Image (spheres, helix red, strand yellow):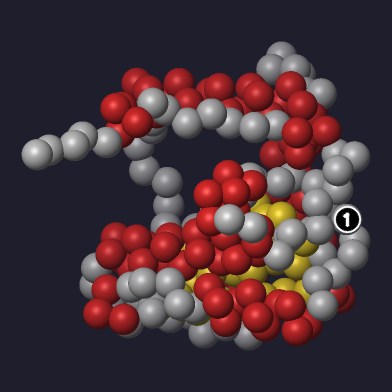
Amino acid sequence: MEFADVVRARHSYRGFLPKAVDEQTLKEVFELASWAPSNCNIQPWHVHVVSAGACDSLREKMKAAAANQSNANPDFPWQGKFSGDYRERQICSAMGLWEHQGVRRDDPEKRAWSWMRNFEFFDAPHIAFIFVTDEFPETVRLAADTGMYAQTLMLALSDRGIGSCPQTSVSCYPDLVREELGVESRFKLLMGLSFGYVDAADEANNFRTERAALGQSTVFHS
């Protein structure tokens, strides 16, 4: 596809088919993503791609952990709340997704179901867990580098007809993920990325968000 088409084709998909992406395509996509830029080319991301039985096992354990919210211990806890335009966009996004999932705001059981879909990885046959090492003091800079990597990865997947959904929700249970995958404690879980071939029959995949007008986020000087 043309680059502009790839960018606009990328959406956060929340329903996947059980069909796995073949190993050669996986290697090609993740190799391409490794060309993302980073500060001084340090490439701080450490990625574990989980598929097949390992993915199913982790999915079940993540669901069980999420059912007991007291077990959550993210390496990067949420701080503060969105306000103003940011809060409005957050609410519009949540309400739009719920509408496509058949969830009413006044239905706590369905809202809980929608939230739990995160920990089912939206039935995706693959999930990538993206870590950063704790040896660097500038965590925000590492997160910026890793964000550029994640975006490059999602565009590379999109170019191959593979959908994805970036998820900070799964970072609530880093100890579980580290233990399951044999990851050292010095690697901190920043996010997950569920991916696979999109289930066109899942109405949630028809949900689209809008973007703010250019002038709201970008100022040109001359």
Give the labeled residue for mark 1.
Answer: 17
Callout 1: SS: loop
Where the N terminus falls, by quadrant? Answer: bottom right
Q: Is residue 12 left or right of residue 40?
A: right
User: Which residue corresponds to the image point at 46% horizontal and 67% vertical from the top-left?
Assistant: 149
User: Which residue corresponds to the image point at 42% horizontal and 63% vertical from the top-left?
Assistant: 148
Which x, y percent locates residue 119?
72, 52
Give the vertical position of 61 relative to 99 (above or below). Answer: below
Image quarter of residue 156: bottom right
Give the vertical position of 212 relative to 135 (above or below). Answer: above
Which x, y percent locates residue 167?
59, 52
Crowding at mark 1 (Cα within 10 Å: few <14, some 14-19, many 20+): some
User: Which residue corresponds to the image point at 21% horizontal and 34% vertical from the top-left?
Assistant: 219
Q: Is residue 34 left or right of residue 93?
A: left
Image quarter of residue 112: top right
Judged from this view, the residue extending furthest toward the front is: 2
Q: Nearer the viewer, residue 162 or 191?
A: 162
Give the vertical position of 115 relative to 146 (above or below). Answer: above
Q: Nearer the viewer, residue 91 or 113?
A: 91
What kind of residue is marked 1?
Leu
Q: Nearer the viewer, residue 176 or 133?
A: 133
Which x, y percent locates residue 146?
42, 66
Image quarter of residue 208: top right
Which x, y percent locates residue 59?
78, 62
User: Which residue corresponds to the image point at 90% horizontal and 65% vertical from the top-left?
Assistant: 19
